[in-house]
Amino acid sequence: MRVSLSEAVALLKSGTPVAFPTETVYGLGALAMNTEAVLKIFATKGRPSDNPLIVHVDSLENAEPLVSDIPPLARQLAFAFWPGPLAIILPKKPSVPDVVTAGLPKVAIRCPDHALALELIVAAGALAAPSANKSGRPSPTRTEHVEADFGADFPVLDGGPCRVGIESTVVDLTTIPPKILRPGAISAAMLKNATGVSFEIVREPQVETASPGMKYTHYAPKAKVSFWNGQTPNNAMLLALHAPVHGEHDVCYSGDIERMARELFDRFRQADYLGLPTVLIERFDAGAGEIAAGLLNRIEKAIAR
Ligand code: TXA
Ligand code: MG
């Protein structure tokens, strides 16, 4: 059910989760300080309770009630990249409910770069929000994806298609050196350029210890995903960055890797909708653009399922 901004605010204040747009993917929001409301997020998604949530704020100042300390590195990052696709993990204040952080002593905070999301946060307060998909499904980048997972009656604030299309970069500032737990549109090089600090890229399987949620299956359509070996069987969807394509469900992005990232999860869902058994993706390297490492991470997770 598509709701207006004021309806979304009223629902949130009454303790009901609402899906809302961000620049990355749609979020399933509840007031971060309301334990009962946050528990409903886990129930709606079928999300394991050991997988912590990101708290969405409208500014670093308004994150002060959530975190026990804002170090200079956090200020530099927020100055450079907020509002934007970067979640920053800091030590949490005791007042943040344990359900939000899955019992961890640290909380992820993010200021989304989306006018509707910011208006919602300003009116309702800080929102704990995972991606608004059923656990194990690709993150939703359109209102229709949220409706496909949660039903047409579920309240959604419609903001159209998401601009980035893969989830935020997640950095943990509670360790030395700071770590990248999840790559996204803000690359390691961008973090280094903005701060002078080298972030450690945590890879599988270590990332599962650093961030409990990373162990769960993500980003996977029902179709089998693999890298393209040059052969295209019937009934496959080929997503190519450069190679010419021929099939009716194939797409060539002509080198536009940001568009490929924007559309990846929608293509995954379309393959399932069309009943295609196979999605093939042309290989590219991590130097293909700032978002390349993040996009490869999502593709590799879908392949590994
Ligand atoms: O772009 C995004 O980040 C989207 C939009 C809605 O903001 N949200 C999102 O949330 O992708 P979610 O819950 O699907 O993914 C959050 C990731 C999970 O892998 C979780 O384990 C990790 O961030 N995370 C959150 N809080 C954490 C914490 N305190 N410590 C370690 N990892 C954390
Ligand atoms: Mg998610």
Image: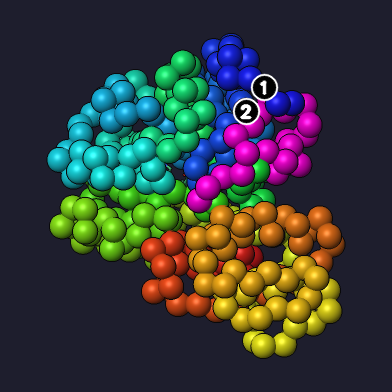
Q: What residue lies at 33% left-to-right and 39% top-to-bottom?
A: 82
Is 155 part of what is drawn in magenta?
A: yes
How is the structure coloured here? rainbow
Q: Residue furthest bottom?
A: 230
Q: Does the magenta-highlighted stretch encompass residue 154?
A: yes
Direction from residue 32 to residue 305 in the image, left or right: right
Residue found at x 47% / y 23%: 119
Q: Residues within 10 Å of mark 1 (few under 14, many from 20)?
A: some
Give x and y (percent) for residue 198. 21, 61
* Residue closer to the observer: 40 or 138: 138
Residue labelled with disc 2 = 157
Q: Of the residues under marks 2 and 1, which one precedes in the sequence? A: 1
- Residue in front for this viewpoint, 204 or 6: 6
**What main secondary structure does the magenta stretch of the protein show?**
loop
Res 223 quadrant in image: bottom right
Residue occupied by mark 1: 3
Mark yes or no: residue 133 visible. Answer: no
Residues under labels 2 and 1: Cα distance? 5 Å
Could you say which is closer to the camera, residue 55 or residue 9?
9
User: Which is nearer the eye, 289 or 211?
Assistant: 289
Left or right: 137 in relation to 275 = left
Assign a secondary structure to mark 2. Answer: loop
Q: Which residues are magenta?
A: 143-164
Res 140 quadrant in image: top right
The answer to whether residue 198 shows anywhere in this view is yes
Amino acid tagged 1: Val
Q: Position of residue 167 (x, y in %)?
A: 49, 50
User: Is the Cβ of the residue at disc 2 closer than 8 Å to that at disc 1?
Assistant: yes
Residue 275 image point, x, y percent: 84, 62
Quadrant of the frame with the C terminus: bottom right
